[in-house]
Image: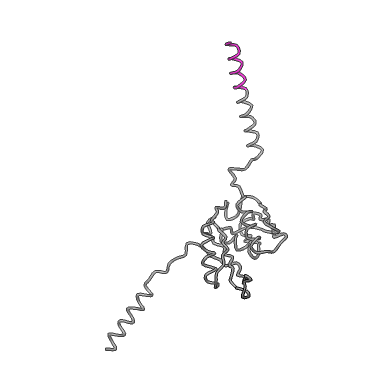
Amino acid sequence: MPGYQQQRDNRKRGDRRDMPMEEKQFDERVVNIDRVARVVKGGRRFRFRALVVVGDKKGKVGIGIAKGADVTTAISKAVEVAKKNFVEITLYKDTIPHEAEAKVGGARILVKPAAPGTGLIAGGVVRTVLEVSGIKNALSKSLGSTNKINTAYATMAALTSVEPAKNWLTRQVQAKKATADKAEKKVADATKAEKAEAK
């Protein structure tokens, strides 16, 4: 029955084609894979260490490092670690509200906001972290160590230190605060005086 067999095969293929592709919620990027060794009694035991950056391109980003017997295991473990360590980043018009700097180990990273259309002026690990976090326009400078793990963590530290505009302590805010404090002090002094007179 070749006709029946052909129909069955077509149906199977059709089923596979009709299945909806599962859209990934997060952008997963493998930044670095190293072969690491542990010295044991019989010699060296080799494993793989993966550094992965995961983000949703909407201000959520995480970094994961994990080891495994093979590359695939190391990457999947690192992705799980990254998803557990998500942090929220303040975005403003596809860039960051103000410049930020952070240092982890010997790696020092400086990230600055840029005008629309500038793009990402960054390289290596810094660029990957900025891309997956959803920043489209930014300038960056990597100073000191080029260690990829420390650079990734320094970039994350710089981005998490960014404050939204509503939390900025400007001169106007300071002046308003000083005025409010003076008014409170006057009210407190007046109530003290009234109590003293009543006695």
Q: Quadrant of the C terminus?
A: top right
In the displayed image of the protein, which residue is found farthest to the bottom? 2
Which SS does the magenta portion mostly show?
helix
Vertical arrangement, residue 129 with respect to residue 18, above or below: above
In the displayed image of the protein, which residue is found farthest to the right? 144
Name the side, left or right, on which 100 lies relative to 26.
Answer: right
Q: Is residue 193 magenta?
A: yes
Vertical arrangement, residue 171 with respect to residue 112, above or below: above
The colour scheme used to paint the residues is one colour
Q: Position of residue 74 (x, y in %)?
A: 54, 68
Q: Which residue does the image show at 67% across and 53% down from the upper left?
A: 102
Q: Quadrant of the N terminus?
A: bottom left
Name the side, left or right, on which 149 lies relative to 13.
Answer: right
Specify the quadrant of the image occupied by residue 146: bottom right
Q: Position of residue 119 (x, y in %)?
A: 62, 61
In the displayed image of the protein, which residue is found farthest to the front? 41
What segment is highlighted magenta in the picture? 186-199
Q: Is residue 73 magenta?
A: no
Specify the quadrant of the image occupied by residue 151: bottom right
Specify the quadrant of the image occupied by residue 117: bottom right
Q: Position of residue 49 (x, y in %)?
A: 59, 68
Q: Nearer the viewer, residue 72 or 110?
A: 72
Q: How many marks?
A: 0
Q: Position of residue 134 (x, y in %)?
A: 56, 58
Vertical arrangement, residue 19 with respect to residue 93, above or below: below
Q: Which residue does the image show at 32% across and 78% down from the upper left?
A: 11
